[in-house]
Image (spheres, helix red, strand yellow):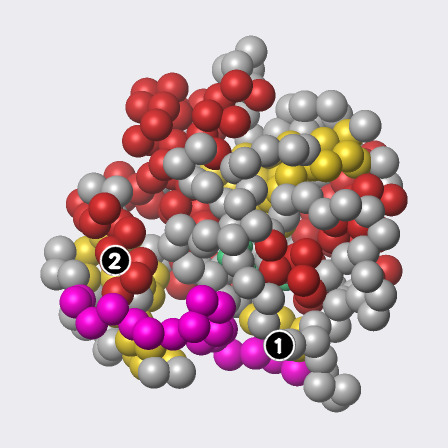
């Protein structure tokens, strides 16, 4: 795999993906993501999962709002590196997004990677899972180069991608003994919808359910409050790093007031 050496100089958090706005100028969707998002210590996450589910033979891991799969591939690479054969019980990971176009690309194993992404992939010795796709053009978004890649089967077959609306999924599915991640997408849903997601999730989960959100949810949504208002409690863990910085933007589900409860990245039932 060729690795581009022009390390991009974008600020810590500047979205490179297209934003969709409503009539009032609020952002109603954006697929921004990247490999190794800094709000999670991905190296430590597998240990948390392995300890929490040590008695289960199979553990469903649901990643809603998975965008192009960057988060899910980061997780799989780290699970395999840390747990080896024992990672198997978490596969295939169930990744989904509300956007059919995004899921189509992910299903076709297509992913756009920046120099920063490639740097991490190389450090993790995960180059063998990605192949440069020279049939597709390099894209430049806000001065950042995105190189088209194909995810190879050895990695790709450890995830199932589907189109899912988390607002519906929490009403129809049960997440007992499972991981439920909806990272950095809560703010694209209204505060009322966020409350409904948390409420339904509480009804459809048990004490083993691990709920994960992202740090942009702390800046741009009421996810942490919605979960705690609905009887989830925050988990103190250094797996959630709080390393991502805030950025100027107003989402459709950004609260106008400060959080009521202490903020967390992981939650479980009280
Ligand atoms: C900013 S991206 C975050 C991607 C990735 N989880 C991460 O943290 O890097 C948020 C994603 O959530 C998705 N999303 C927004 N509302 C959703 C909903 N109601 N159900 C499922 N996905 C949703 C968007 O389409 C988008 O791809």
Task: Tell me, for residue 118, which label it has, or none.
Answer: 2
Write down the quadrant of residue 259 in the picture. Answer: bottom right
Q: Does the numbered disc 2 mark a residue whose Cβ is under 8 Å from ligand 1?
A: no
Q: Is residue 219 visible?
A: yes
Q: Which residues are magenta?
A: 4-21
Secondary element at image label 1: loop
The residue lying at 25 percent from left, 76 percent from top is: 138
- Which residue position holds label 1? 248
The residue lying at 30 percent from left, 31 percent from top is: 81
User: Front-most of 171 and 15?
Assistant: 15
Q: Is residue 172 visible?
A: no
Write down the quadrant of residue 199 in the picture. Answer: top right
The residue lying at 38 percent from left, 54 percent from top is: 35
The quadrant in which the N terminus is found is bottom left
Q: Residues within 10 Å of mark 1 (few under 14, many from 20)?
A: few
Which label's residue is closer to the chain start, 1 or 2?
2
Instruction: List x then y, in percent, for residue 73.
Output: 38, 46
Instruction: List x then y, in percent, for residue 71.
Output: 45, 50
Asked whether, in this view, residue 253 is left or right of residue 39, the answer is right
Asked whether, in this view, residue 163 is left or right of residue 33, the answer is right
For the view shown, which residue lies furthest in the top direction?
A: 55
Which quarter of the frame holds ligand 1?
A: bottom right
Secondary element at image label 2: helix
For residue 203: magenta? no
Is 38 drawn above or below residue 61 in the view shown?
A: below
The residue lying at 26 percent from left, 42 percent from top is: 124
């Amino acid at each position: 795999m060729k690795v581009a050496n022009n390390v991009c100089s974008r600020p810590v958090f500047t979205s490179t993906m297209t934003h969709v706005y409503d009539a009032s100028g609020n952002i109603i969707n954006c697929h921004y993501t990247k490999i190794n998002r800094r709000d999670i210590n991905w190296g430590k996450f597998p240990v948390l999962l392995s300890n929490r589910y040590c008695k289960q033979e199979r553990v469903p891991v649901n990643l809603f709002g998975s965008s192009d799969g960057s988060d899910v591939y980061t997780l799989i690479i780290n699970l395999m590196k840390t747990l080896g054969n024992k990672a198997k019980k978490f596969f295939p990971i169930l990744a989904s997004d509300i956007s059919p176009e995004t899921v189509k690309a992910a299903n076709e194993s297509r992913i756009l990677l920046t120099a920063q992404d490639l740097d991490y992939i190389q450090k993790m010795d995960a180059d063998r899972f990605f192949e440069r796709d020279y049939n597709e053009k390099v894209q430049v978004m806000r001065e950042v180069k995105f190189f088209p890649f194909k995810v190879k089967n050895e990695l790709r077959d450890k995830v199932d991608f589907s189109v899912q609306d988390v607002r519906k999924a929490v009403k129809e599915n049960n997440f007992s003994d499972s991981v439920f991640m909806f990272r950095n997408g809560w703010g694209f849903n209204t505060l009322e919808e966020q409350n409904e997601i948390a409420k339904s999730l509480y009804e459809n989960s048990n004490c083993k359910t691990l709920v994960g959100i992202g740090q942009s949810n702390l800046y741009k949504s009421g996810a942490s409050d919605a979960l705690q208002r609905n009887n989830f409690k925050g988990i103190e863990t250094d797996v959630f790093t709080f390393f991502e910085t805030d950025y100027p933007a107003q989402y459709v589900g950004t609260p106008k007031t400060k959080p009521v409860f202490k903020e967390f990245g992981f939650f479980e039932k009280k």
